[in-house]
């Protein structure tokens, strides 16, 4: 377990007493935080959307505690899970092992695992080769977990690879509102498919 310099948690639950629509949970990091508001607006009238976004990595006890608590707090029809840009100290094998532990707390089959988004080769503060390797490993793990468990896969890496440069920020990780809108379109499509 290795901590980052800063740690943060953001969450929101919509219309928590209402049960007339299916409830969806988005779990992820700052990328999820960036598109969650757009997703919620796009699904108005179709689903209530809650979200949990955090910088904690999957090997931290607090992460599993957070995700487990959220999943058990409401009756979720779909969980969209996007994690991969934190805990860069984890090897592919360790990442897979911790992901399996986290996913073991999700007791329903309506899970969508998302691949991690592209890290721009400039501005990310780490060697390009490092991130190319990490993303390749983690996205392979995500796809393997989908196959093993019958989860749907939202290939956000593929989507993010086509996002224009002007829709990216200088830090190499994040996106402008238009960039997040492109990601949100994919997230919503995958959720609607699961709900239908």
Image (cartoon, helix red, strand yellow):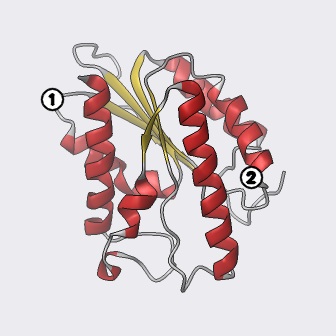
Residue at 70%, 44% in the rendered image: 58
SS at mark 2?
A: helix
Residue at 67%, 78% in the rendered image: 129
Check contact, mark 2 vs mark 1: CB within 8 A.
no
User: Quick one: 108 or 138, which is closer to the camera?
Assistant: 138
Residue 55 visible (yes or no) = no
10 Å neighbourhood of mark 2: few (<14), some, or many (≥20)? some
Q: Position of residue 50 (x, y in %)?
A: 39, 34
User: Quick one: 11 or 194, which is closer to the camera?
Assistant: 194
Residue 2 quadrant:
bottom right
In this image, 131 relative to 10: left or right?
right
Residue at 51%, 19% in the rendered image: 73
Q: What residue does disc 2 label?
A: 92
Q: Position of residue 193 (x, y in %)?
A: 27, 31
Numbered tag placed on residue 45 in the rendering: 1
SS at mark 1?
A: loop
Asked if residue 88 is positioned above or below residue 101 in the image, the reply reads: below
In this image, 21 relative to 118: left or right?
left
Asked if residue 37 is positioned above or below residue 153 in the image, the reply reads: below
């Amino acid at each position: 377990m290795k901590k980052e310099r800063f740690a943060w948690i953001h969450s929101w639950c919509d219309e928590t007493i209402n049960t007339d629509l299916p409830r969806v949970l988005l779990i992820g990091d700052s990328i999820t935080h960036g598109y969650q508001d757009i997703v919620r607006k796009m699904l108005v009238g179709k689903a209530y959307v809650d979200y949990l976004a955090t910088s904690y990595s999957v090997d931290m006890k607090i992460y599993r505690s957070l995700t487990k608590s959220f999943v058990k707090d409401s009756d979720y029809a779909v969980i969209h899970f996007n994690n991969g840009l934190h805990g860069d100290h984890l090897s592919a094998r360790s990442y897979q092992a911790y992901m399996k532990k986290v996913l073991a707390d999700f007791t329903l089959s309506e899970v969508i695992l998302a691949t991690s988004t592209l890290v721009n080769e400039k501005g990310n503060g780490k060697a390009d080769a490092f991130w190319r390797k990490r993303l390749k490993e983690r996205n392979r793990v995500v796809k393997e977990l989908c196959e093993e468990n019958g989860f749907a896969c939202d290939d956000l890496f593929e989507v993010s690879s086509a996002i224009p440069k002007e829709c990216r920020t200088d830090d190499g990780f994040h996106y402008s509102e238009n960039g997040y809108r492109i990601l949100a379109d994919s997230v919503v499509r995958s959720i609607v498919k699961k709900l239908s």
